[in-house]
Amino acid sequence: MSRRAVVALILLVTSAVRADNFDLFGYGPRGSAMAGAMTAEANDYTSVFYNPALLVERKDVNFGFHFQFYRMQADVAQKDPNSAKTLTCTACTAPDSIGYSLGLAVPLGGKVKNHLALGVGIYLPSQVLLRLNAPDTNTPYWYRYNGNPERLSLHLGAGIRIVEWLKLGLGVQALADLVGDGANVSVDLFSKQVKLNTLNSYLGTRVSPVVGIHVSPTSWLRFGATWRGEMKLIYQIPAKVDLQGVGTLGFTVSGVAHYSPHTVSVGAAIDPVKNLTISLDGEWQNWSAAPSPYVNLVIDLSGKTLDGLGLGSALDVSSAMQRPGFADTISARLGGEYRVSERFAARLGAFYRPTPVPKQDTAGTNLLDNDAIGVTGGFGFNFPDPLEIFQAPIQIDLAAQATVIMPREANKDPADNVPSYTYSSRVFGASIAVRYDF
């Protein structure tokens, strides 16, 4: 089969989308500029996220520092401005996503030289290490953008070369759970004194596996696949107040945030001519298993006095929880890079991301999301260190991205507390990175 025929065949394959910060905006400007179609093409420290099998492609230690800024422009409007109901819009625009990331790829030497490499990737939000943001059910809330980008992300991986054309990758992504025994308070109502006041909560480590494979039958044709396990932050904050002589007031706030589903990515990269690379990714995400993003609140008031009055369970309260009804998605990404010279490369990309979120016409849910189309672009260049501190050239990469979330309506029942509304948004941003090979 000719090279042109292979190109035409691959262009019929669908490609990818992701869900946390790296999923939404890409890891590193090269990946961002090529729309994240990196499963078969990542060639630096960003492989630890896209496909850890590609870490072993590095011949030198590779380090990178990356800064990004993304801003949403949202249009959320009440359909009937004359309605007696008012739309609460405190979360109708997501906060800016501003953060830094570091990456390192280290090929090992000795008897495992050219056969084993390690990598690490870290994302640090600029303002907070972790934001736990659970929406009110009556408040429109951008599901992907209001919370997920603001969290510390850690990715660790290893690439293993089995034979020259076959590489495997193993890795983990790490997050933390907020759990513990919570607060215990004892109050003497007669003397109006607090007898006991303790708090015990902590962040527990949660890890999820990553597995990758890379096959390169020729130098100009490469295939890759990655599976990333489900990731979520579980929070559970219990509290108990002992009202001496009356009863015990117990309540628990719990839920799930920063959810990323099981994800399978497949990709291909091809060099139809010497200085041109075209990459495509296809991705399936198991959104149908997603839990509700809303807070679950349980209040339990009990005690001998209350039981004697027949009020032991009459004052108990539990928030109504419902499955979000998400659907699995298959998405597409296409990227290209043209190396003008050894010093300069230009990049373009586009992606289509279907939404897993169903229409929000029912009461008790107002999650904003819809199908999204994005265009990306950027360039990279390198130059010798003018101070001659570093021997190898310094690489600078820049990328810009524009995402349009298509218009959608939420047509509420007249009995709903929330009026009907329309929504759409645009997300614009840019990123810059410095890379160096030691």
Image: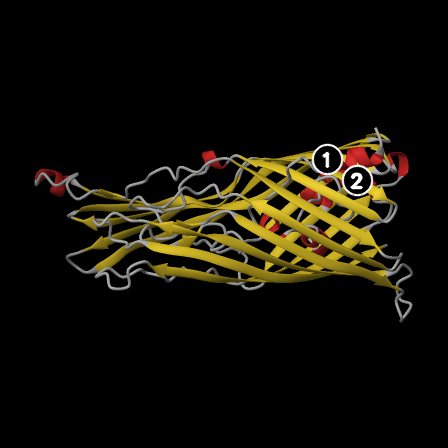
Q: Assess disc 1: are there few (<14), some (14-19) or many (≥20) residues with their C-alpha within 10 Å of its C-alpha.
A: some
Q: Is residue 20 above or below residue 226?
A: below
Q: Residue furthest left?
A: 309
- Name the quadrant containing residue 400: bottom right
The disc, 2 or 1, on the residue closer to the chain's N-terminal end is: 1
Classify the position of the C terminus by image quarter: bottom right
Q: How is the image coloured?
A: secondary structure
Q: Secondary structure at mark 1?
A: helix
Q: Residue furthest bottom?
A: 387
Query: At 76% across and 40% down in the image, what residue appears?
Result: 269
The disc placed on residue 409 is: none
Q: Is residue 117 above or below residue 391?
A: above
Residue 42 location, x and y as percent?
Answer: 75, 45
Query: Does residue 160 appear anywhere in the picture?
Result: no
Classify the position of the N terminus by image quarter: top right
Identify residue type, mark 1: Ile
Identify residue type, mark 2: Ile
State yes or no: discs 2 and 1 in contact (Cβ < 8 Å). Answer: yes
Residue 80 location, x and y as percent?
Answer: 28, 60
Q: Nearer the viewer, residue 251 or 407?
A: 407
Q: Assess disc 2: are there few (<14), some (14-19) or many (≥20) residues with their C-alpha within 10 Å of its C-alpha.
A: many
**Residue under label 1:** 10
**Residue under label 2:** 270
Q: Secondary structure at mark 2?
A: strand
**In-image side of 12 versus 415 (left or right):** right
Q: Nearer the viewer, residue 283 or 374?
A: 374
**In-image side of 432 versus 188 (left or right):** right
Residue 10 location, x and y as percent?
Answer: 72, 35
Give the alpha-carbon distance from disc 2 to disc 1, as whole Å: 9 Å
Residue 388 location, x and y as percent?
Answer: 91, 68
Q: Is residue 266 above or below residue 362?
A: above
**In-image side of 292 versus 2 (left or right):** left
